[in-house]
Image (cartoon, grey):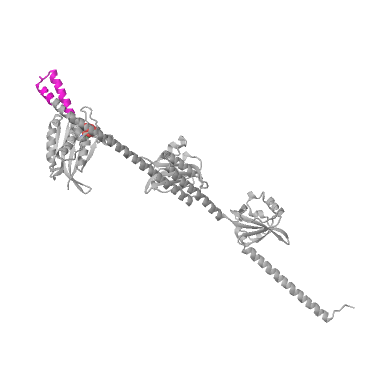
């Protein structure tokens, strides 16, 4: 007979089943909520997480990892972890995984576990990874927490570079205080710039400075580069090639390859680019730093800033040298002027001492000349003495005038009177050489000055004009008025049609003792005296001259 359950039994069983069902339901609920909590935990982790089994297969990843690497969970699930590592690091990867599972332990971040990670798109990034073992029902797993440290690395590099830059700048300042030549300082500074790690520069560069020629760069450092490479670019005019352009435009010029802007590209056949940084003092270019970079190098703001800082440190060094050189030059000039003034005083004394005996010799020689019979040796000797004494008297006059320390005796006078008196003295000499004298006088105000000195200045011009026309010509003297820089001047122009003055001599004619007169020897003091007189009268002298055509000397006397 079938074993029928009683109704009570069935009710009891049903109750038990219902209870079981509730228990199961509670279990399922608990399981789901644990799983959800677990998932939330994984997803809320700040780092990208990957769970790997001992076979290096990916069991689970979180959303951060998907985002970081560009894969979906499905794409990664069950794949070898090496998918997240660049090819070149895969060789040792499996051994590392098995080593870890043989001795599983917690390895926190920052314990030298920096890796290079590979994204789905093939790009790489530096990452820090921490590892910890995780025991699960499916066995032991390794949990890897991965952090992208690109920014940290960049900041570290930046700090390192800044440190080196600071070091270099303080070293540059130290070099600037060393008592060595400017060239040696430039060499040391160039070496310092090229020593900075991470600056992406080739270990090669030049420093150019502007010297006497204001628009030309002159190579200063390094002094050790081979002549073959150095000579074509030792002197570079502003505007030529990249560094000439940087000098002319006062801006940094950058290029990442050898292109047409490299006018001197044959010098370095290897591929390269350049940073050409001007060394500036305000708007003025003092030089250029020319550095080589690797081809394809990307211009970086921090490099620009660093090189500009170095260029400005260099500018102060160059300026300091210029000031020192100028100071040295002025000191030498002062010493020379003191020497000259002492010499001048001695010369003036000697000239004064000689003047009286010379007057006696001249007087007696002239008497002898008159008394001696024409054609005799005595007459010839007397004439010779007279000529030489006259010359010595003129030299003496000039020397005394040049070394004269006294200030001018000023009075108001008509400059025409002085000109007429001077012309009277030269009429005979001019006539002997068939020189025509032309006068052009206009109405002018009286000037205030030392009459004797002004006459001397004009006489010097007449004398030179006559000497410049040995074969005759025209000596024109004209007066006038001119306004220069809002100041009105009375002018005296002395014009000749003589041999003129060469450009080369133009800079020298006012130097004391400069003379080109060899036949009738000159003292070379006339123009120096004339200029000195003009300066003492608050005026100046101007020249226009053309070789074989003639010269015009103009004296400018101020009046108010
Ligand atoms: P000096 O007449 O004794 O040579 P100066 O100082 O008066 O000395 O002149 C210096 C030089 O300037 C002259 O030797 C001459 O070469 C040049 N010079 C001056 N005036 C003239 C002129 N009018 N024409 C040509 N050369 C001149």
| Residue 340 sits above or below residue 124 on the image | above
| Residue 522 sits above or below residue 121 on the image | above
Front residue (pair 208, 190): 190
What residue is shown at x 73% (from left), y 61% (from top)?
138
Q: Indicate whether residue 8 is drawn in magenta.
A: no
Quadrant housing residue 210: top left
- Looking at the rendering, the stretch of residues picked out in magenta corresponds to 363-392
Front residue (pair 516, 514): 514
The spot of residue 278 in percent (x, y) is 41, 46
Ligand 1 picture quarter: top left
| Residue 509 sits above or below residue 120 on the image | above
Residue sitting at the far top:
376
The spot of residue 161 in percent (x, y) is 51, 49
By secondary structure, the bulk of the magenta-drawn segment is best described as helix
Quadrant housing residue 458: top left
What residue is shown at x 15% (from left), y 44% (from top)?
447
Image quadrant for the N terminus? Answer: bottom right
Front residue (pair 46, 13): 46
Q: Is residue 238 visible?
A: no
The spot of residue 20 in percent (x, y) is 76, 74
Q: Is residue 484 visible?
A: yes
In this picture, residue 513 sits left or right of residue 29: left
In this picture, residue 84 sits left or right of residue 449: right
Q: Indicate whether residue 385 is drawn in magenta.
A: yes
The spot of residue 271 in percent (x, y) is 51, 43
Quadrant housing residue 208: top left
In this picture, residue 228 sits left or right of residue 492: right
């Amino acid at each position: 007979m079938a074993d029928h359950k009683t109704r009570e039994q069935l009710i009891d069983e049903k109750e038990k089943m219902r209870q079981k069902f509730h228990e199961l339901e509670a279990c399922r609920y608990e399981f789901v909520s644990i799983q959800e909590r677990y998932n939330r935990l994984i997803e809320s982790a700040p780092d990208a997480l990957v769970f790997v089994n001992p076979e290096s297969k990916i069991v689970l990843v979180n959303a951060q990892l998907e985002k970081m690497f560009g894969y979906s969970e499905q794409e990664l699930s069950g794949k070898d972890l090496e998918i997240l590592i660049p090819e070149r690091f895969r060789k040792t990867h499996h051994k590392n995984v098995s080593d870890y599972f043989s001795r599983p332990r917690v390895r926190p971040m920052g314990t030298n576990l920096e890796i290079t990670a590979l994204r789905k798109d093939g790009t790489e990034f530096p990452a820090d990874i921490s590892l910890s073992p995780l025991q699960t029902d499916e066995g032991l797993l390794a949990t890897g927490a991965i952090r992208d440290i690109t920014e940290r690395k960049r900041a570290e590099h930046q700090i390192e570079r800044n440190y080196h830059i600071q070091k270099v700048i303080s070293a540059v300042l130290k070099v600037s205080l060393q008592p060595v030549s400017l060239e040696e300082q430039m060499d040391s500074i160039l070496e310092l710039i090229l020593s900075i790690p991470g600056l992406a520069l080739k270990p090669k560069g030049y420093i150019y400075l502007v010297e006497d020629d204001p628009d030309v760069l002159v190579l200063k450092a390094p002094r050790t580069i081979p002549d073959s490479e150095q000579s074509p670019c030792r002197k570079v005019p502003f505007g030529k090639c990249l560094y000439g352009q940087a000098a002319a435009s006062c801006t940094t010029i950058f290029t990442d390859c050898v292109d047409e802007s490299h006018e001197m590209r044959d010098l370095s056949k290897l591929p390269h680019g350049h940073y050409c940084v001007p060394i500036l003092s305000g708007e003025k270019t003092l030089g250029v730093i020319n550095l080589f970079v690797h081809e394809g190098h990307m211009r970086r703001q921090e490099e620009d800033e660093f090189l500009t800082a170095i260029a400005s440190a260099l500018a102060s060094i160059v300026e300091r040298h210029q000031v020192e050189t100028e100071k040295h030059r002025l000191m030498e000039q002062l010493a020379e002027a003191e020497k000259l003034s002492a010499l001048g005083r001695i010369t003036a004394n000697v000239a004064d001492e000689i003047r009286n005996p010379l007057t006696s010799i001249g007087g007696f020689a002239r008497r002898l000349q008159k008394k001696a019979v024409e054609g005799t040796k005595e007459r010839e000797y007397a004439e010779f003495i007279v000529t030489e004494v006259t010359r010595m008297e003129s030299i003496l006059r000039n020397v005394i005038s040049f070394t004269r320390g006294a200030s001018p005796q000023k009075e108001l006078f008509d400059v025409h009177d002085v000109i007429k008196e001077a012309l009277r003295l030269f009429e005979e000499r001019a006539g002997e050489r068939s020189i025509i004298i032309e006068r052009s006088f206009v109405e002018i105000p009286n000037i205030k000055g030392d009459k004797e000195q002004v006459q001397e200045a004009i006489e010097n011009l007449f004398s030179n004009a006559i000497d410049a026309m040995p074969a005759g010509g025209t000596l024109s003297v004209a007066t006038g008025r001119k306004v220069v820089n809002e100041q009105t001047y009375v002018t005296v122009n002395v014009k000749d049609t003589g041999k003129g003055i060469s450009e080369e001599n133009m800079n020298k004619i006012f130097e004391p003792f400069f003379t080109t007169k060899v036949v009738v020897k000159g003292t070379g003091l006339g123009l120096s005296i004339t200029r000195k007189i003009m300066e003492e009268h608050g005026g100046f002298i101007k020249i226009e001259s053309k070789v074989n055509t003639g010269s015009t000397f103009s004296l400018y006397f101020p009046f108010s």
